[in-house]
Image (cartoon, helix red, strand yellow):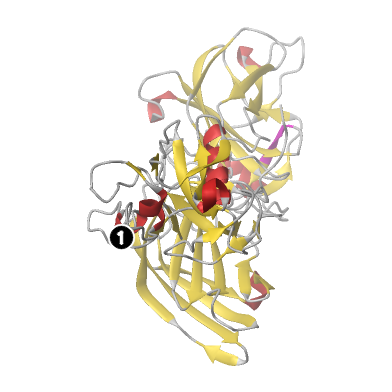
Amino acid sequence: MEKTRIKNKGVRARREAGTWLLAAAMLLGGCSKEPTEGMGGPSGQVALDFSVEGIEKVLPVTRAALASGATVRVIAYKSGDSNPATENYANECAYYWNGTKLVPCMVDANGNKTADLPDWAMTLLPGTYDFYAVSPALPLAADKTKLATAIANGVDYAASDKTTGTIPIQTTPYALTLNELQRKCSRLTFVIRKEDYVSSTSLYVMSLKVTGLAAAKSGVTVGGDIAPASSGTQSLDFYSYDFTVSGTTATQKTPSVVLPLSGATLSLEINLVVDGTQLKPSLQGMLSCTLEKGKAYTITATFAEIMEITLSEWDAENGNNPDLNDYPYVSDGNTIVMQDRYGFAQGYPLHGPWTQTPIYIEETWNANTSGLNTFGQRFMVAKANAVGKEGSSERMTWYEASGMKHSTYNSNGYLACAQYSEEPDQSDKGMWRLPTIRELQLISNMRLQKKLTAVDLLAANYWSATYNADYNADGAWSMAFDFHLPGRGYRYNRYYVRCVRDL
């Protein structure tokens, strides 16, 4: 088993003097002295030695891998369809993860470890039981089916589904592996940056306040989810020391753990200094979002075009970049990312956003003598083929594909990609363009690797915007998707067109 760890931000392990009596009262009827080997234990009870499946594992990323010192409460019920049920409650015990195994301990009302109990263990009579685990090891309410402590923003709460196990008659501790801990909260990271075309050179974050987060949740059922709130009044405050600044991009150092939201509206108050000038944009009620359990979100505030929110699975190692430092990569099954805030593709010349690809000449498909045989920084591949000037045929001459006028083949200067649209209201019309031959070759690579999952490309020839002087100055570059080879053909040949859009 591959072993890596995710830090549990909501748990702080600490010893508090004078808490022994309180903790013991909280665990009354829980951990017991482990039965002495050969003695059969008190009243025939069997000691249990627990482990949690995937407790040190990152993937899938919704699992709550524990940092050393994090606590876990295990609750046992007599097996039954109604569990967790008060009438079936059997026992419970708190543990902490020492980096190798779960060790019995005492905890306070917030699930923080107060004392080690290495010689103790949960004990049960032989029989069949349903087991649940929660982290941190929050105490149970009087009904033994719910948590006594409310779960607030900042607590990396996780719980396992029911594990059913049969305890045999034996005098040695019985080992039982529980189901995986699943994260029940969301993770949120804030980024403040300038738009690329803004000429600012310095940025300093004085403070950031986010309002509209969910209130603490009381009465959470053992093993259950936290019901997402549709609104909230709670807030989080951040200051300069909470951010790492690189140039004109400030990134929150430690992501925040927050309770789930469903269609809630967040407000931001930002206080920053840009090139020596203090700015205080107030973004009241501008961000409507859903924060799902076990998922990580990045909220990016940019000067000029204010709000962007991105989503990924919760992976503490990779943040919200699905392919950290592995460029280019495909996002959403149809978008090729050459550059983002994390880095860029090495050895790939890039261009800014184009709505129409310039017509240029290259002697070889991978040359860049023109300076235009380049890649968009982030470009979407169209879901369908464009159509020619007659409006029905998907196969067309290079002249129709590129928009170059020709007395015979394109007298009116028809430009196929300029007419292409995917939005119902055609708001994206005029934003699509013909790819360069290098972009088209990269699209073919991603197709072969089965990464363009939202794009269906035919095993056929497709035109690029790049032409050459072959065939009596009437040649252009195309891509044969059936053979994965760039080729040259007469511009009056009829090939398919797949447009791209810079984002």
Q: Nearer the viewer, residue 65 or 338?
A: 338
Residue 103 falls inside the magenta stretch = yes
Spot occupied by residue 501 in the image (x, y as percentages of width and height): 43, 56
Q: Is residue 431 above or below residue 420?
A: below
Q: Nearer the viewer, residue 499 or 83?
A: 499
Q: Quadrant of residue 444?
A: top right
How packed mark 1 is, by other alpha carbons closer than 10 Å (few <14, some 14-19, many 20 or more), is some
State the predominant SS element of the stretch in magenta. strand
Furthest-front residue in this view: 472
> Would residue 229 be visible to someone looking at this image?
yes
Q: Is residue 38 above or below residue 232?
A: above
Q: Which residue is depicted at the point 64% across and 70% down?
A: 242
Residue 219 falls inside the magenta stretch = no
Give amino acid for label 1: Lys
Spot occupied by residue 11 in the image (x, y as percentages of width and height): 63, 51
Furthest-top residue in this view: 169
Q: Which residue is depicted at the point 67% across and 52% down?
A: 19
> Would residue 261 be visible to someone looking at this image?
no
Secondary-structure class at tag 1: loop
Label count reads 1
* Residue at the spot of label 1: 429
Q: Which residue is depicted at the point 55% across and 30% down?
A: 483
Q: Which residue is depicted at the point 46% across and 71% down?
A: 210
Furthest-bottom residue in this view: 277
Q: Nearer the viewer, residue 480 or 499?
A: 480
236 left or right of 22 in image: left
Q: Is residue 390 above or below residue 55?
A: below
Spot occupied by residue 41 in the image (x, y as percentages of width and height): 68, 15
Stretch in magenta: 101-105
Q: Is residue 469 above or below residue 486?
A: below
Q: Quadrant of residue 39?
A: top right
Q: The N terminus is located in which quarter? A: top right
